[in-house]
Amino acid sequence: MFDVTWLALSPIFLQISTDGMNLINYDPRQFYAETEGGSSFKYVIVPTGRKIQRFVNMAVEGNSVALPQFLKKIELIKQGAEARVYRGSFLGKPTIVKERFPKLYRHPLLDEKLTHRRTVQEVRSILRCRKAGISAPVVYFVDYTSHCIFLEDIVGSITVRDHIASTPLSSAQKIPEERLDQLAKKMGQILAKMHDEDVVHGDLTTSNMLLKAGTESGETELVLIDFGLSYISALPEDKGVDMYVLEKAFLSTHPNTEALFEKLLKAYAASSKKSHAVIKKLDEVRLRGRKRSMVG
Amino acid sequence: MCSSFYFIKKKNVIHYNSPSPSNSLAVMTVVIGFEGSANKIGVGIVRDGEVLSNPRRTYITPPGQGFLPSETARHHRSVILTVLKEALEEAGLKPADVDCVAYTKGPGMGAPLVTVALVARTVAQLWGKPLLGVNHCIGHIEMGRLITQANNPTVLYVSGGNTQVIAYSERRYRIFGETIDIAVGNCLDRFARVIKISNDPSPGYNIEQMAKKGTQYVELPYTVKGMDVSFSGILSYIEVRSGKMLKYNQCTAEDLCFSLQETLFSMLVEITERAMAHCSSQEVLIVGGVGCNLRLQEMMGVMCKERGAKLFATDESFCIDNGAMIAQAGWEMFRSGQTTELSDSWITQRYRTDEVEVTWRD
């Protein structure tokens, strides 16, 4: 009947398995159900699995108590600059919950506007990337009232930042450098693919890329995360600025890795069809930073 | 109080030996600093981490006008010797007591920098003391570190001419995030010109006071690009729209000041938070003229509390450009063995913070 794996998601049903649910006679996109408490909830189906034909944007209304309670029970792994990240199990799958909590230092109107915009952009960009075959976590569920995104947990992965930091860069040892060269090449290729899809990540740093041990050939796979500042743009200007952000983050976190970044750019230029304009813009943007006059 | 170093005069070049580490504890090093890269001219004297004097004068223009390089330089020329005299008198020192003359090498406005460098060079040669060219941004950071005793903070340097998020790593103050166009103080000052508020004591201070009375939040563009920020967009927006908004009474000037501050400072707090998360840092230090703004300090404090981090800020005598900060940075540089030859004592308008090798920290 379906060539896509469907999962019905609901905060209330987290404690109950989905076996008891009657999945016949409903609109493929949404249905209403009643819980014992008598409150009515609108449930939305999110397609997960390999063949994603269509993603249905959704909003879950109603009781927002269940979600905070769920968050209290699962493990908080870190508080990043924008969101709290939890690790838990959601319908049997290892899940990361990214909660964009309200920032008290901002004016409430500004905060709401920003948080909502970022949540929406993040989900849209991840799905656009996934549709194009770029490695990004699967989106399981989104709650727009509390701005939570339930994402696939990439188990057994480390950030590229930690990987580079743990690999010694001395010129005497050739082997570690070769490993990093492979990494730089992969990074260039995946970024080229992303920019060809007109997705501008907006916050490219080595902490926002994960290295996952691959299952087939034992090769490591690169996964992009944290699309909170991303947007869709075809302009070489925006893509150039994107690469500039990565370059600066790269060189400030990992000093003396200029050669590595050059290899990344070479791989990028080789993999992308529209790379020439972007690299040209990147050179322009680099000069922009330096020539800026500083007064005072 | 005798100095433990000596100098040899070779033709027109003067060489010095700096105090060796072994007897540095016994010797007190006095450094005088000259600062005048923008509209503030200050001379400060520092002795081993103690600020002995720090007088300053500000060139204030009428409302609606900014300060131009030539006029600023003229102002500095007219007051610098008075300020120098004040500094020596307040500290109770004679020229012979000074060990090193530090001045702002850059970045900043050309004409004022030249004026100050000229006085510093002359004074150094008259008194027979070594010269030291200091980076203005490093001056702010070192003074912030001295006053607050912060260990290894993420520094937010915000002023009229610079907006950078800096963290120390491997002998350099690395810039993690910065403005890709204008500085936040510049944005505030130019907006102050648009609504024609007084520049006395500073436009930013007057915007802060007006913002306290603002109630309505006006939506303004918010531009954070990764770790960087951009202010020219929000400035153009508010320059163009404020006229109409005020004319048709959609909001008051106080509301605009309030909204502008909220938006600008939210952007700054956000990039600081990102840098902190990236470096796993638990301390924040705000330096630079805009760092005096209590609303910015308040917002940063809220963010720090949420993360369990500590906020360090200084008061307006050290936030705003002053001579003692140049003296303090000069003190650090001098004690680690650096001096500037006379032939190298030029100034530059473009001098990045990460160009300086930080030889006084591990």
Image (spheres, rainbow, N blue to C red):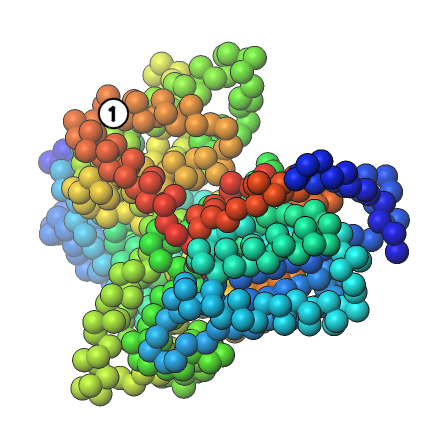
Q: Position of residue B192 (x, y in %)?
A: 35, 76
Quadrant into which the C terminus of chain B falls: top right
| Res A36 seen here | no
Is residue A182 depicted above or below B214 in this figure? above
Is residue B242 depicted above or below A144 in this figure? below
Q: Is residue B280 left or right of residue B361?
A: left
Indicate the quadrant where residue A64 lies. bottom left
Residue located at (38% from left, 66% from top): B68
Label 1 Cα neighbours within 10 Å, binned few <14 / some 14-19 / many ≥20: some
Name the chain letter of the residue that bears numbered label 1. Answer: A
Q: Is residue B350 left or right of residue B343?
A: left
Is label 1 in a helix, a strand or a loop? helix
Q: Position of residue B147 (x, y in %)?
A: 68, 62
Residue located at (31% from left, 37% from top): A243
| Res A265 seen here | yes
Residue type at numbered disc 1: Ala
Please give the residue where the numbered disc 1 appears in the rendered image. A269
Residue projecting furthest to the front? B11
Indicate the quadrant where residue A47 lies. top left
Quadrant into which the N terminus of chain B falls: bottom right
Residue located at (28% from left, 37% from top): A282
Is residue B265 depicted above or below A258 in this figure? below
Residue located at (39% from left, 52% from top): A293
Judging depth in this view, the residue of B56 and B273 nearest the camera is: B56
Q: Position of residue A245 (x, y in %)?
A: 36, 42
Judging depth in this view, the residue of B3 and A7 nearest the camera is: B3
Task: Count up the numbered dots.
Answer: 1
Q: Position of residue A97 (x, y in %)?
A: 39, 49
